[in-house]
Amino acid sequence: MGRFVMYAVLVTLAAFVLSTYVLLEHGGESIAAVEAASIHDLSTQPERFANHEVSVQGRMRHNAELDQFEVLDESPGGANFALVVRSYHTEDRLPALDGKSVRITGKVGFNSEVGIYIDADTIANLEAEE
């Protein structure tokens, strides 16, 4: 009888450890925190933010030369930094945001063709919130 209780406890403990591992390994991705960052930080440290969810603020602009939307750094001295909006689920909203101050949240990446980009999940018009 004692041996049966000992094996039952070991099996229960093993099941608990395994389920905890699975939850921590795979369940944490859906509740990952969104990190606030500046466009300057994204431009100067792209490897730090690659494949991370971030939230940045700046001024939306349509670059007619490259036919793409970008978010410009509005901080003092940050006019040379831009973040390309590579994708957004409702891209038809982007022209209305041209020239507006926005907060954009999404996954950041970098490639040699585009540079620093964001796959946007949300874009909020900060001028409309005032």
Image (tube, rainbow, N blue to C red):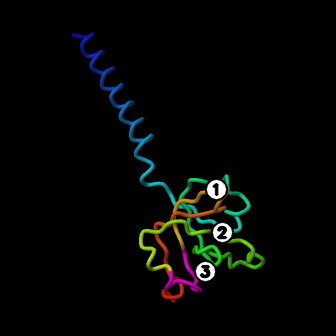
Q: How many neighbours does mark 3 have within 10 angstroms: few (below 14), some (14-19), or many (20 or more)?
A: many
- Residue 4: where, in percent of width, then height? 24, 13
Residue ID for mark 1: 111
Q: Check if mark 3's residue and mark 2's residue have beta carbons within 8 Å.
A: no
Q: Check if mark 1's residue and mark 2's residue have beta carbons within 8 Å.
A: no
The one nearer the camera, 45 or 129, is: 45
In-image side of 71 versus 26 (left or right): right
Q: How many neighbours does mark 2 have within 10 angstroms: few (below 14), some (14-19), or many (20 or more)?
A: some
Q: Is residue 27 above or below residue 35?
A: above
Question: Going from the N terminus, do you reach mark 3 or mark 1 first?
Answer: 3
Residue visible at 57% across and 61% down? 35
**Magenta span of residues:** 95-103
Residue ID for mark 2: 38
Residue 97 on the magenta span = yes
**Where, by quadrant of the figure, is residue 115 drawn?**
bottom right
- Residue 73: where, in percent of width, then height? 68, 75
Label 3 to label 2, Cα distance in Å?
17 Å
The one nearer the camera, 70 or 30, is: 70
Question: Going from the N terminus, do you reach mark 1 or mark 2 first?
Answer: 2
- Residue 93: where, in percent of width, then height? 45, 80
